[in-house]
Image (spheres, rainbow, N blue to C red):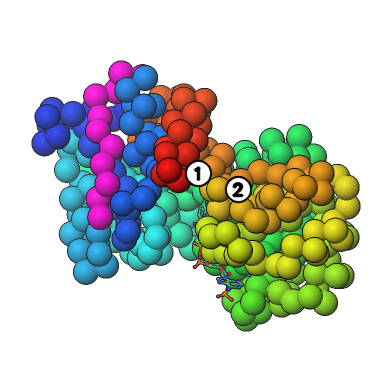
Amino acid sequence: MTEPAAQSSAGGRFRLGVIGDPVAHSLSPALHQPALDQLAIAAVYERWHTVAADLAKRVESLRQPGVLGASVTVPHKIAVMSLIDEVSPAARRAGAVNTIVNRDGVLFGDNTDIYGFGVTVSSALEGRTPRVALVLGAGGAARAVVLALEAAGAGEIVVANRDVGRAERLAHDLDPAPVRPVRLDEEMLTRELPRAELLVNATSLGWHTGESPIALENLDLLAAGAVVADLTYRDTDLLVAAQARGLKTVDGLPMLVHQGARAFELWTGAGAPVQTMLTAARAAQASSRT
Ligand code: NDP
């Protein structure tokens, strides 16, 4: 950890936090605080609710010596890029920063969602490289998914979006990643699902029961060994229907935890206690449903 020149205002402890709007339901404090405590790092992880008009001021405050850095969430992952000093090549390519590190007053931004999805999918696929992956959605999260799949050596990444123009822009921006942009419709699903070894839901649909980016019967088209990943961190209708068909599934919580673990390492220089973070995040997720 970089030694700060002065202590923070949080009772002599270093400070970290999540910047977003809203942040009330963020699981990040629940996974980071137990990790900091386990390693006896004297830091407090807070919720820093920030509306767009206050973003520049908030980012400027991260330069204070007692602040280690911040997580960045919706809707600020793009806007913070122009407010910090350095952006990693991966974050620049993804077009989004989700982690800011305060290096003695110089703010460095990275995108740890790419790493988070990469670890998650490699574990779910037991180290296999997918020849064909079908990604539903073309927003910021889909960009991180595509970069992780590219790094994993995926042969073809089909990106299906309701607004096909957005999928085409993604393919253009992430060139030379092996992306084929398509429109998300039934005809495409009939054609692509039998070929896909990995199906990823990177749309914002799935947080509520009865919500799915595709009609669930389409899952019958997947091969028996296919894996279904959902970035939503709950058992979505899509995942439940895939499990009912005997398919292997993974929800969004491991991705959240692994991106957090990578951020933790950037802030503190210490290895993250991933199992503690996963257990804490699962507990917080369960209690948020009760
Ligand atoms: P964006 O708003 O950038 O993108 C949303 C995507 O969902 C777009 O592709 C959009 O399509 C699609 N979509 C929205 N509504 C519909 C609909 N009714 N039918 C079909 N497609 C739809 O969001 P993000 O990419 O930032 O996030 C996507 C999801 O990933 C969210 O649920 C988020 O919580 C989750 N996430 C999880 C992470 C984790 O660690 N597990 C990390 C980051 C995100 P269109 O372009 O056509 O509007």
Magenta stretch encompasses residue 87 = no
Instruction: Indicate which quadrant contains ligand 1.
Output: bottom right
* Left or right: 213 in relation to 104: right
Task: Specify few, some or many for label 2: CA neighbours under 10 Å numbering under 14, 14-19, or 20 or more.
Answer: some
Residue type at numbered disc 2: Asp
Question: How many angstroms separate mark 2 from mark 1 (CA)?
Answer: 15 Å
Q: Is residue 273 above or below residue 52?
A: above
* Left or right: 24 in relation to 216: left
Q: Position of residue 247 (x, y in %)?
A: 79, 45
* Left or right: 250 in relation to 87: right
Which numbered marker is on residue 256? Answer: 1
Residue type at numbered disc 1: Leu
Instruction: Give the magenta part as a residue range.
Output: 39-49
Q: Position of residue 110 (x, y in %)?
A: 44, 49
Mark 2 residue element? loop
* Image quarter of residue 270: top left
Pick whichever, 174 or 25, lies toward us: 25
* Image quarter of residue 15: top left
- For the question of whether residue 86 can be seen, the reply is no
Q: Residue at x 85, y 58 (%)?
A: 220
Circles 2 and 1, Cβ within 8 Å, touching? The answer is no
Pick whichever, 48 or 96, lies toward us: 48
Q: Residue at x 17, y 43 (%)?
A: 64
